[in-house]
Image: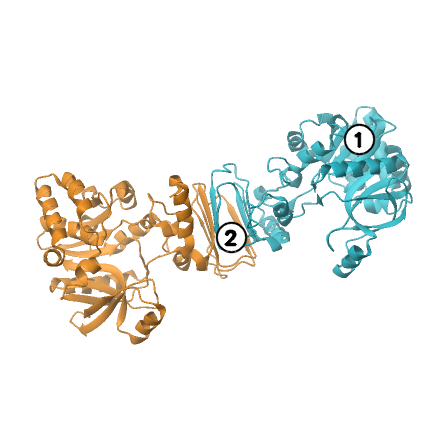
Chain colours: A orange, B cyan
Amino acid sequence: MSNIYAVIMAGGAGTRFWPASRAKTPKQFLPLGADPSEPLLAATVRRLRPLIPPERVYVATGEALVEATSRAAPEIPRGQILAEPVPRNTAPCVGWATATLLRRDPDAVIAVLPSDHFISDEAEFLRVVEKALGVARSGYLGTVGIVPLRPETGYGYIEVGEPLSFGAFKVSRFVEKPDRARAEEYVRGGKHLWNAGMFFFQARTMARAIEAHLPDLWRGLEEIDRAARRGEERRALDAVFPGLPSVSLDHGVMEKATAVAVVPGDFGWNDVGSWESAWELAAKDDAGNALPDDAVAVDATGNFVCDRTTSGGKRVYALVGVSNVILVETDDAVLLIPRDRAQDVRAVVDRLKSRGDKGRL
Amino acid sequence: MSNIYAVIMAGGAGTRFWPASRAKTPKQFLPLGADPSEPLLAATVRRLRPLIPPERVYVATGEALVEATSRAAPEIPRGQILAEPVPRNTAPCVGWATATLLRRDPDAVIAVLPSDHFISDEAEFLRVVEKALGVARSGYLGTVGIVPLRPETGYGYIEVGEPLSFGAFKVSRFVEKPDRARAEEYVRGGKHLWNAGMFFFQARTMARAIEAHLPDLWRGLEEIDRAARRGEERRALDAVFPGLPSVSLDHGVMEKATAVAVVPGDFGWNDVGSWESAWELAAKDDAGNALPDDAVAVDATGNFVCDRTTSGGKRVYALVGVSNVILVETDDAVLLIPRDRAQDVRAVVDRLKSRGDKGRL
């Protein structure tokens, strides 16, 4: 329907994919899904298309990333790239997008989606999104919860309550990242879903919820909105946005609101949270190696080589007697790390920071 | 003394240092010693200089390597680079050099030395060479045997006989590469030295020995010599050299001759036989890592990164949680291999050969 809009959240620092990701090239610009030529952001826009065409897709990002965003998703009209002067977490981001869409369409129904996740079953994803939009049209703040596959301690969970129509459920509560024991309980119990950061709502419902639960944010958004109606949005943004409360939509709104619903989703979702996830998604040979063409692997299993050099493709990678390691190459940096330590890329980024090596961050 | 000459043997395929070594850039052209800017061949020429200056140093190599040899050792007069049309093992190589030097100086005393070994105690090396030259002047075919440090099964050994003057010993026999048990016996027994492929002799003594033990080779060398005296050496080489018997000097001459002597040497010798040896020789941090400048090592020990790309030095290498691996980078190839499997580089070279990837061999 023509009053359905998407807001794709595409901020993000992306240190977990160093050296491929940088401050100016965070994760959503990397082709980390199954197609080695399609950035995650482009895939996000493409997979929405049957339901929400680009003319109704907005992308929220940082000012410094507007150009890169436009290059990665050229079908999005430039005026629909919402450039935040500074990052203030998701509530101000979603709030500003909501206010913006209310000016365009008072009946707007909005799907807020992350820009940097992978989804293998896109048809099923769209079916779930349609359900969630139905929930939103009924006046709920909707979300999609992923049916958990393992006792993951890195995600928040959504506790499912009583059933509604549309295959949706009331949300009992949002749960912070649990410890291992609790996560195992959640998976066994069958009443918890992974919080994947997707939100579905009527713009006016969200506006009222922000006004009720985050009145400071609401006042700021109103000031920006008034300036926008005078054609002076940019100046107001620069003045107001940095002072908005930095709070997540989950914490600031979803956890406090009462009419909150969740649709369970099971569509091959992967948050691509580390090089380990990227290896999981990549095409692999029989020995579990994801290597560039022409690579030579001798007694080598479960390795991932990611060649992001500008001369990429010209080099033969030869791996002998090594297993389960990740090798990432760019023009100015090389990372070698075991797959099961992929999270520790942060240690490298920290070292470079303390060294003042801004060129490589 | 002015009748002392050196012949540096600089042929060699050098597959063990792939991808840094190639058919056109074998090991002697790589800076694998302690000084990361000095190729092994250049170090060989430099360390001889106090005893044998470049005007009396000859380098024997393959025709395809003459240019590279001249670049690596520019102080050697071009006419002293002996270009073999085809490789025919060490006896023809040394024989041809001997005949060549006999034309220049009938009293020539020759030190034959490999081009691609490392020596840490150069002063002691020169003392040992002087002793070996003394042995040679007494009419012996001399050699230097390295005091063994471990039961190495990859080298030939020299069994030491009765003592001579000059700190030398008669050679009882040359021993092929032993098995582990035998090698341990040799090290314990104290009567065996490593054969390091160094030979010292009067040119006329070697000529007589070749005539006696390898008469076919001798006839070929005489033919080349006669042509050389007419200024037609190149043509004769092309016609005769490929037909010379392909045999090592050890097998063909040293093992058969009677007046053969050895001087024990203990001067920090290393044959730089693999990336593992190169790591041993390289400058390392406290954690045993030999890494380029600016590298970041987190929980990483005993690693060796060799950046041989033309943009070398521009890249930061970050190693997290990996130990005892070797990473070698060139513009067209990358090798990742554990240190203790360094010998298996051959497997990669074999794969590339069977694939017909001549550009990378």
Residue placed under numbered mark 2 in the picture: B300
Residue reaching furthest to the bottom? A189
Judged from the image, the secondary structure of the residue bearing numbered disc 1 is strand
Label 2 sits on what residue type? Ala
* Residue A171 disc label: none
Instruction: Please determine whether, in this image, residue A278 is positioned above or below residue B130.
Output: below
Quadrant in the picture for the N terminus of chain A: bottom left
Protein chain holding label 1: B
Number of marks in the rendered image: 2
Give the mark nearest the N terminus, 2 or 1: 1
Label 1 sits on what residue type? Tyr
Instruction: Please determine whether, in this image, residue A288 is positioned above or below residue B219.
Output: below
Quadrant in the picture for the C terminus of chain A: top left
Circle 1 packing at 10 Å, graded few (<14), some (14-19), many (20+), is: many
Q: Position of residue B115 (x, y in %)?
A: 71, 38
Query: Of residues A155 and B105, which is closer to you in this image?
Result: A155
Q: Position of residue A69 (x, y in %)?
A: 27, 44
Please say if the residues under marks 2 and 1 sit with CB atoms less than 8 Å apart.
no
Q: Would residue A201 be seen by someone viewing this image from the given angle?
A: yes
Q: Position of residue A28 (x, y in %)?
A: 31, 50
Q: Position of residue A241 (x, y in %)?
A: 18, 45
Drawn side of residue B245 relative to residue B163, left or right: left
Q: Quadrant of residue A3?
A: bottom left
Residue reaching furthest to the top? B230
